Image (spheres, rainbow, N blue to C red):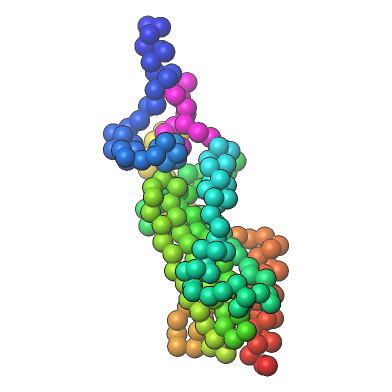
Amino acid sequence: MALWIWYKKTHYNDSDWVKNRIKGRSAEQQAVIRYFKNEPSCLSKKPINDEEYDQLLKETLKSKDFVEMALNFIGIDSEEVKDVDPIHFEGYSFDDGALQKKGIDKVWRSSKYQTTWIFFGKNQIFIYQYTFFMDEDGFKQKAEDYFYPDVTSISISSDREDIEAKDKNGNKLKVNVDYSVLTIRIVDGQKFDILVPTNDYTDRAIRGMKSLLREKRNS
């Protein structure tokens, strides 16, 4: 009995889905998958907790120089956008099959994260967006640039995403996750959507961007 208890406490209680998902993943990616899919149990090795997942995410963000990545991907020099400080937004994304979980602190987290940087040149606005996954090596990046007169509006909206979760008994259920989206619209009908957090920085950044665009269009 003692040997069985020792074995259980030193091994994860992985489901077949988890066992298949962690194959070929790094140790950190395996930890992330177990964080989202393994329930803590006194009879098995515990997955990382909310704070430890937050720390993994923080370290991942720190390991990347997003400004340099953005400038290289867009193909511009820092001198071209030096007059106005760039702004950036970041947050969890809950679509495209990302793993989701409501933490002990009642905060919804996802294995998919998105960061967007906006640079302001003399005649154009440059947008760089990088989306990555904590449970795999995949990432997406895209960039757009628009002449100031072509930007017709900047608006923010609150959206609600239906995601699949589980109750304490393991039963599947649909839950709602609320998040905000900043939409930049262009004259030809194009638009660029950006996930934004709800905080004072977002409010100040959007007000400043709107003011700058009005100034540029009227100059």
- Quadrant in which the C terminus appears: bottom right
- Nearest the camera: 14 or 57? 57
- Quadrant for the N terminus in the image: top left
Residue drawn at (45%, 39%), measured in percent from left and top? 28
Q: Whole-percent x and y of residue 163? A: 42, 52
Residue 192 is at least partly visible in this image: no
At horizontal 69% and vertical 63% (from top left) the residue drawn is 201
Q: Position of residue 117 (x, y in %)?
A: 56, 67
Q: How many marks?
A: 0
Comparing 69 with 127, the one in front is 69
Instruction: Based on the picture, tell me whether residue 199 belongs to the magenta stretch.
Output: no
Secondary structure mainly formed by the magenta segment: loop
Instruction: Residue 29 in the image: state x and y as whole percent.
Output: 42, 41
Which residue appears farthest toward the top when viewing the image?
A: 1
Q: From this viewpoint, is residue 6 visible?
A: yes
Residue in view at x 37 percent, y 57 percent: 96
Left/right placement of residue 210 relative to residue 97 reads: right
Q: Which residues are magenta?
A: 34-50
Name the spot of residue 5 as percent of width and height, x first: 41, 12
Q: Residue at x 63, y 70 (%)?
A: 86
Name the quadrant containing residue 189: bottom left
Q: Is residue 192 above or below residue 90?
A: below
Q: Is residue 37 magenta?
A: yes
Residue 212 position (above or below residue 47)? below
